[in-house]
Image: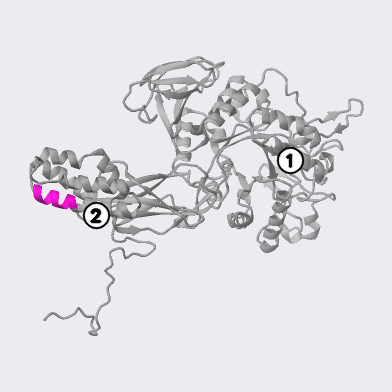
Amino acid sequence: MSKPITSGDDAPLSLDLSPTATGPFGFGRIPVAKVWPVIEAGAYPVKAVVGELFPIGAKVFREGHDAVNASVILTSPEGVETRVDMQPVGPPGLDAWQGWVRPDAEGAWTFRVEGWSDPWGTWHHNAEAKLAAGMDLELVCLEGRDLLERTAALADEAGDPVEASILRATAQLLIPQRKAPDLLEVANGAGLAEAMRTHGPRDLVTPTADFPLWVDRKRALFSSWYEFFPRSQGASRDEATGHWTSGTFDSSHERLEAAAAMGFDVIYLPPIHPIGNAFKKGKNNTLDATEDDPGSPWAIGSAEGGHDAIHPDLGDWAAFDRFVARAGELNVEVALDFALQASPDHPWVSSHPEWFTTRIDGTIAYAENPPKKYQDIYPINFDNDPVGIYHEVLRLFKVWMSHGVRIFRIDNPHTKPVEFWRWIIERLRETDPDVLFLAEAFTKPEMMAALGKVGFHQSYTYFTWRTTKFELTEYAVELANDMAAYYRPNFFVNTPDINPFHLQSGNPAIFGIRAILAATLSPTWGVYSGFEFFEHEVLAPGREEYLNSEKYEYRPRDYNAEPNLNLLFGTLNSIRRAHPALQQLRQLHFHHASHDGVIAYSKRDGDDVVIVICSLDPDNLVESDVWLDLGALGVTGADSVLLRDELTGASFTWGERNFVRLTPSTPAHILHVLTAP
């Protein structure tokens, strides 16, 4: 008589041998490893927007030779689970699986990967091998009939009696007396394979932990931004006295309407608060400001108020509300700059001096980025009174939200604690999950990534400094793949702070090229006003600053002046609205162009496919062969495709190898893949 296994003290051992025994992490009965995307081991949610298609991957394997399979289980905020079966990807033997999911509602979702033993995959593999060799026909048929009967019962349970009947009928065809080729034909039936994918048994199901996924509204991923200074719109100068009269919110309606007519759906305003007088900056960032110099809008705060006040020159709260309401009528949102810093005149300096850093000589430290000095700005010290500062900032956001602002462009978030931004974003998600943050953080990669991981909905990027084909390709691939789960790029072609070297020639072609690249490589792009008129004068050689920067003076413009890029802006935004392929980030594929001055790429979402061929040379005609990867375009069974150029309306039939000629005046094709001819 056998005895139970015991430990050293003769107590029976307790061993959990249930087939799916596993903890939230580690290997279970069917090992599942390297689930992605997972942000910092699940500490922060993966990002998506409503309707966005994105991939989830894992390594799934098991002992021996029986087949495994895998599924993604997507759980909605209401707790409804959706199963999406994964497919093997990459070289056989590396056990990589991937499934594409598309959440359909905003809010806090989760996902997990389930590995499972696949009886159908195991039987079908064995049947193909044995039937081809004429081996074990009786056993193969017996096992197959049992599996199909089992699956028919599952189809009945799922409320699919028609499929159940077909499965039972198919089972009766597995008769060992039939010829092996006939049995193989039954096993390989397309309808059978589909039925087994839908209803086939999933044995030894082994789930991973549930990982967080946050789904935002679509504008978090897809938008077109236009930036202008309200004080410049309608500003006028008295030639006799030299005195300036500021533009206002009411005089900015015309620019708002013009931007909306060009297809921009986010209007971004620099800070609109009172500006301090202490160390007020004059023209070109000088310290000899006159009474008529307006000062930098980023030097926030005066006796007239701080971050919860409006500069009186721009109007009152009623005027601001009228501006936001007009934007809403145009289906445009107002994004407000939120610069968490203070001028020496800000009310905080006297009411909360502990919120700043006092140097050893007793003075308050102003902002510096040597050799640049910003004497008109005091940074906040978050370590002196974090509770007070955190709650005051949350209050300020809610003040502006109550006036219709649902998008904030955060100035220099990388100079504030990452933990602070996590706290703010989590609090706002609890009450106002539609509020969006854009991180203006041109800094080190890890800090930019961290801001995205803790919840910033969009981020400025290095696009401004990526100009060659290699640089653009490498960076776009990184954004569309490794970073896409936590970092949504906003490709601004210029900013008030940055006059890129490649624009300083003033050549209109480079302005057009950069607009085309930004609008088609990224689902979100942005323009600072003046770009459309090729403004390019530089403050000093070797610098990336504008001469006569609007940051320090009024800059009224004639927006009807020729030449301009208004028509191109409108065309690009219209193309973007018409094509879901250009509204997503992740499905980007680069195609080979023989000329280093030509870049070729395609984007797709479902059946919508767009190819962009763009010159990178603003000075010369370029000619190049372009090889299309038809498989990446979703073209099967054909060796050519019918295309329509969305910029010109011209039609082409292209095959794998094609010739293009691009000039500075016609630097690009934006091609919609219509059909295989």
Nearer to the camera, 553 or 373: 553
Residue ID at (72%, 32%) = 256
232 relative to 584 in the view: left or right: right
Badge 2 amino acid: Arg
**How far apart are labels 1 and 2 at the CA level?**
62 Å
- The crowding category of the residue bearing disc 1, from other C-alpha atoms within 10 Å (few below 14, some 14 to 19, many at least 20), is many
State which quarter of the image contains the N terminus: bottom left
Q: What range is drawn magenta here? A: 137-145
Question: What residue did someone put label 2 on?
Answer: 150
Q: Is residue 588 visible?
A: yes
Say which amino acid is labelled 1: Val
* Front-most of residues 651 and 79: 79
Q: What percent of the width, then of the height, locates residue 555? A: 76, 30
Could you tell me if the residues under marks 1 and 2 are in contact, i.e. CB atoms within 8 Å?
no
Give the class, few, some or many, for how many residues have Cα within 10 Å of label 2's Cα (few <14, many ≥20). some
Task: Name which residue lies at 48% across and 33% down.
Answer: 581
Instruction: Report the side of 506 relative to 18 (left or right).
Output: right
- Residue 362, percent from left and from top: 76, 58
Indicate which disc, 1 or 2, sits on the residue closer to the N terminus.
2
Residue 364: percent from left, percent from top: 75, 55
User: From this viewpoint, is residue 529 visible?
Assistant: no
Compared across the picture, whether 480 is left or right of 317 comes to: left
Q: Is residue 388 magenta?
A: no
- Seen in the picture, residue 211 relative to 555 is either above or below; the reply is below
Location of the C terminus (image quadrant):
top left
Residue 324 badge: 1
Name the dominant secondary structure of the magenta segment: helix
